[in-house]
Amino acid sequence: MEFRLLGTVSVETLTGPLPLGPAKRRSLLAALLLSANTPVSLGRLTECLWDDEPPSQARGVIQGHVSRLRALLAGADAEAYGVELATLGDAYVLRAPETLLDSQRFEELLMLAREQRGPADAVLMLKEALSLWQGPALSGAFAGPPLRVAAHSLEESRLATVEQLARAYGALGEHHRAAALLTAETAAHPLRESLAAELMLALFRAGRQSEALDRFHRTRRLLADELGIDPGHELADAYALILRGAPGPTGAAPPKSAGASPAATSPGSEASASPAAPPGSGASPGAGSPSGAAGGGTDAAAPAPPRPPFPAAPPSHAGEPHPVDLLPRAPRGFHGRAAELAALSRSAAGEAPVCLVTGPAGVGKTALALQWAHRNPALFPDGRLFADLRGFSAAGEPALNDVLREFLLALGVSPRRVPESVPAAAALFRSLTARRRLLVVLDNARDSATVRTLLPGGADCVTLVTSRHRLEGLIASDAARPVPLDTLETDDGTALLAGVLGEERVLAEPVAARRLSELCGGLPLALRVTAARLAGRPRWTLAALAGELADERGRLAYLDVDDTGVAAALRLTVQHLPPGAVHQLARLGHHPGGHYDPYAAAALAGTDPVTAREALEQLAAAHLVTETAPGRWVLHDLVRLYARSLDPASAREALIGVLDHCIATALAAADTAEPGGEPCFVLPEDFRRPSAVQDFADRAEAMRWLATEREDLALTALAARKAGLDDRAWRIILLQWPQMVWRVRDSWSPLLELALESARAEKDAYAESRVLTLLGWVLTEEGRTAEAAALLERSPVLAREAGDPLGEATALVNLAVVQAELGDLPTALENCARAVELTRGEGDRHTEMLTLQHLARMHLTAHRPQEALDCARTALDLGPEHEEAARRSLLLAVCGEARLALGDEEDGIRLLDRAAQEAERNGYDEGAVRALGALLRVSARTEFRRRYDEALRRLAEES
């Protein structure tokens, strides 16, 4: 199954495309796919399906289309692909793996192209990305305003990719191909200056200077005739480069005579900028030198030959004993890991290298080490030693003397000559290995000290260590080179299953095989246990087992076979941890979100952030948590399930701890982001204040925290609701109001509806009023005016009942906004004026500023520009200039529009430009669009149009 947006909106299956029916149904599908795995509100879908006023039965029409789509997907066995069209309150969500969506694959290929080190590889990625396009984006759908914005954004991304591919061709010297590609696109988009500029440069570098200049003059005339503007800086710069005869930064100058290379190694060319080739690749002498330079005393024209990746093997002598080999057999069914195998080869190329393979239990460290060792026997003519140090085994670690004794006997030492003390045996081992080329594999090491004792003495020996711990001491003391091992990608996990079960069985159920790989978290041990279960049950389907594993409650049990399995492996890791780290791990399992910082971890464990950070570092060293960013950790799904089983009785206590942490931190963030704002609520009676709360240096940091933690805050609030902790649920949601104001069209209504359920469950008039006020405003901004009005009519009444005059004022303002939109401007003005009185009576300048801002806007709507200007100026005088960035932008915009209405065009344009700049500087794109839109109604300046389009694009990308 494949969903297509890059062309005609369609769903491709093995039997052909699904019969989607009318254009509006395709629009509905497109809207859901553009926000795949995220709830899309009914209001948003309505905007996508109707251009003008929607019919009164719009909800029923949408429900009908959803019902038909569900039936079509079910008939195509969508569930087997992990696809589900679900209803969430007043919203719908289409859950689907991103790999099934062509627009997501397009973005992934672009990301891969950016990561390529050479232009040839980038070309392959970019061509593959563009091949996904089969016509204009979202074709065949009725394009309401949001879909038009999305289609425009997708087309912009496609054109930018075309330009990127042309530049990659240029870096390869293939300027004719770049010109051919750009000529076709320029014909379709003749007014796109960046395309024309790239085409001019490609033609010039291909030796077609006259065509390049002609292209400039044609585009210049077209811009003047169609838009009345002169060429922008990109076009003008390209023209200037061509006139000077300069090639520009992406390619060499055009050939001047037959046979001249267009990719000559001039400064800035690909040849001079390319990284040094690896040893033995045919690069020039010296390219593989570790220092990047010739050896001391050599002539520059005749550099020393590169050091090979391994020292040359000493000549063998007749009659020498066969080299020792203690390696276990090579692992069966080994798949993938090409990058890690290459990293081991690079790490082993130094002098007396110690290579350190680290990773969590079950990730395949031993398999990787043995695979590499068996692939490179010729590198170690004197033999290969192996010892399982059992650092994480229930049987305990072997005595070091026993390990050394085995090594010495293998090297030919008679039993009577093996020293009894560890230091003496280690010294003899180092002496015997000093002139040999050996591989020593030390598997399952628990600490650095054990490994140091077993290191060989020869500069040509390689030591390969595997461990669940990071062994940073070994890195510090012996320059060990870490090769971290992560979980398998889905395709490699599927290949591992096929290696055990046979390709026929896996190919018969490819989607279920991928699902099994995902449920096993890419952990080779879990995959092998899964394959073992299926191998012993030939009548079981892969889909049936995937269904069993999907239930978290029994997943760990299914991933254990006899004494082998994920839980058993994790248990052996955990038993070596200090008690504090075990306690922290057990509490982490009860966190409803996915990420942790030291403050959240401390709240879960009932400790402080310093203790929590130390425990997290210990868990990270044991590869039980992963640090995804500085101070931010995550648990593997299977580790989370195991951690939850360590202390199930503490689940509620841990949940309350993290809920109160979220409330305390969100309060601090809201206070920093919007200082002077009144508190949203009093704290719950049994609130447990965390031992420490994160400080935020400024508004940007506070807003960044709210944005980063949004998903985890939503999951935490949902967990609170399910646990009956409604007094926490609505507070956690309401405290995100600064982010809601900043990104109002970012699908907040489902979360606020959850808050409303919690407030009503608590029978709390104060909470219900506050939530209704915010939800009503969000619905208004989403275009759901009638729904907003129905909610907001109740909000001021509830606020009065709760004795909350500031809440009543805010509710009256939001109600007035809706009334004005519905045409009842006199009532709206009365409500706004009443709100101003309430805020002044309470002496709250922050809320008074808000009420005056809306009153000013309504005076402007009522064609009272002087009253609007007076209100806006009064509001601006209430707030310091460095605060209230969004509100200041909106007030400045009102001042500018009022000035224009009063006939002062110069001052009006100046104020509107100030409003737009303030919004742009602070990332408030809604405000920028509003101010720049007003500017474009009175000014045709190209700069305003460019900034307006950029702000619109940013909004489209964020929606």
Image: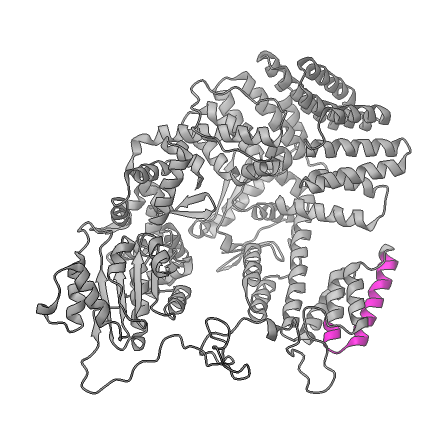
Residue 906 in sight here: yes
Q: Is residue 270 left or right of residue 725?
A: right
Q: Is residue 369 above or below residue 77?
A: below
Examine the residues drawn in magenta and state their main secondary structure.
helix
Q: Is 294 one of the magenta-colored residues?
A: no
How many discs appear?
0
Q: Is residue 290 above or below residue 926?
A: below
The residue closer to the viewer here, 791 or 926, is 926
Q: Position of residue 395 (x, y in %)?
A: 17, 51
Name the image colouring.
one colour
The residue closer to the viewer here, 741 or 16, is 741
Q: Is residue 299 left or right of residue 514?
A: right
Q: Position of residue 636 (x, y in %)?
A: 38, 47
Picture quarter containing residue 822?
Answer: top right
Instruction: Give me the residue at 15% from left, 64% from top.
Output: 405
Q: Position of residue 811 (x, y in %)?
A: 65, 21
Instruction: Give me the residue at 35% from left, 80% from top.
Output: 312
Work out which residue is located at the far left of the displayed protein and give it. 416
The magenta stretch spans which residues? 202-226
Q: Is residue 904 above or below residue 639?
A: above
Quadrant that contains the C terminus: top right
Picture quarter containing residue 848?
Answer: top right
Q: Position of residue 177 (x, y in %)?
A: 67, 74
Q: Is residue 440 left or right of residue 337?
A: left
The residue closer to the viewer here, 128 or 786, is 128
Q: Is 212 one of the magenta-colored residues?
A: yes
